[in-house]
Image (cartoon, rainbow, N blue to C red):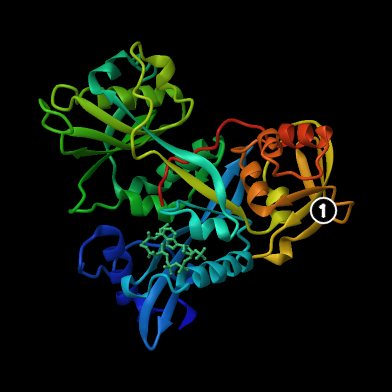
Amino acid sequence: MRIRPYRAEHAEQAFQLRVTAFSGATHVEYDADEIYIPDEHRLVAVDDGEVVGHLGVWPFNQAFHRHAVPMGGVGAVVVADHRRGEGIATRLLEAGLAHMADAGMAISTLYPSTPVPYRRWGWAYAGVRMRRRIATRDLLDVPPAVTHVTLRPYAASDLDAVVAVHDAVTTTEPGGLVCGTRWLQRALQPDPDDPEIAHVAVRDHRVVGLLLLAKTAPSEAHGSYDVDVLRLFGVDRDVERALWRAVAHHHTTAPRTAFVSRPADPLLFDLRHGLEMTDPSTAHFMTRLVDVQAAIGARGWPPGSATVHLDIVDPQHPTNAGRYVLELDDRTAVLTAGGTGRVTIDIAVLSSLYTGFLTATDAARDGRLPGATTADVIALTDAFAGPTPFLRDFF
Ligand SMILES: CC(C)(COP(=O)(O)OP(=O)(O)OC[C@H]1O[C@@H](n2cnc3c(N)ncnc32)[C@H](O)[C@@H]1OP(=O)(O)O)[C@@H](O)C(=O)NCCC(=O)NCCS
């Protein structure tokens, strides 16, 4: 069995492996036109001509303090049913990590169906994708937009404008996915098996927002359908309010609405009756620093200055391991090899601190920062502090 770069000859088998593993179907019609992870960022495990494993890496960016950091979004990690438990996923992860390092992806993020194999390779819980539910009629409390915003159906020619609005919004979010064109093109392409309704918001003849929703089977009696808001974003809150009011107008036929939310969702402040706090499909994502120096250099930082001596432990990717000095000064930081290595820090702990999900205070209380003085803990806590990182997307 060998891990190889994905080639056209693997396409059909890799497609069956991936789609059947995640859909529960036994066979799915091969779709040669699928917009998917670029071939050069996919790996397959091949044994005697048979594709028995697959791993893909979306070339994304993820924003921290308004700076987009090159991020490999690992997805479609799958091993053939009859070959599980042999260590194939482990070998794919090892090769995937090397690939991301070569491709200049400073960090990697993924959603684990089980954290076990990823934790072993240095990924750590690092943020949340939150979904919430609401009584659709409660959305009538959202104040009407005060500017003139209209909605019209999305057309393929809107893609570039939608991507520009999306990425401008997510660059300001903690952990925001700055995804680029291909990912949104995939999300917005019509799919007859999975009908979704896409509208753009327009103001002054410019595309200023997007609403993508699906109508799903009603979860409770008395409704014709439920609304699932898959994407809702606009250049400002006024545009988003116009989009939410469009959702509200489904209330006569759809009593319930589920939506991709944010931890400090603006609806919490707009609505009289509040929200159901979480939907069961809320999930955590995991992140791993692939290149510690590039990752530290690429993200944004708060004001202030600090110096902390680290000894990074990373047996799975030893180029990261060793002593470094973290120096923060005036919204930039550098990680320079050397120093005393006073604070021992595992790559998984550093990865979770990096996104702002774990605080150094909690890590130290847990015994995960051996050697750290009180001053080190405060410096690290303040350097990495920020609102809870979240992603709107699932990949
Ligand atoms: C998850 C999956 C990719 C693992 O592949 P695999 O080749 O069987 O994994 P490995 O043999 O390399 O196991 C790696 C480690 O993870 C553990 N592990 C693997 N699958 C696990 C599971 N479902 N639950 C808990 N632990 C699991 C193994 O015990 C092993 O740990 P160890 O080294 O401590 O023994 C495979 O089960 C699969 O394809 N599942 C369906 C698709 C899926 O869920 N993909 C993951 C998307 S994030």
> The N terminus lies in which quarter of the figure?
bottom left
252 on left or right of 40: left
25 on left or right of 208: left
271 shown above or below 219: above
Q: Which residue is mark 1?
A: 324
Would you say residue 207 is visible in this rendering? no
Nearest the camera: 257 or 366? 366
- The residue carrying mark 1 has its beta carbon less than 8 Å from ligand 1: no
Point 67% across, 44% down: residue: 299
Where ligand 1 lies, by quadrant? bottom left
314 shown above or below 231: below
Q: Position of residue 118 (x, y in %)?
A: 52, 58
Nearest the camera: 203 or 352? 352
91 on left or right of 241: right
79 on left or right of 189: right
Would you say residue 154 is visible in this rendering? yes
* Residues packed near mark 1 inside 10 Å, few (<14), some (14 to 19) or many (20 plus): many
Q: Position of residue 119 (x, y in %)?
A: 55, 55
110 shown above or below 28: above
Q: Secondary structure at mark 1?
A: strand
Quadrant housing residue 220: top left
Point 38% across, 89% down: residue: 48
Indicate the amino acid at tag 1: Tyr
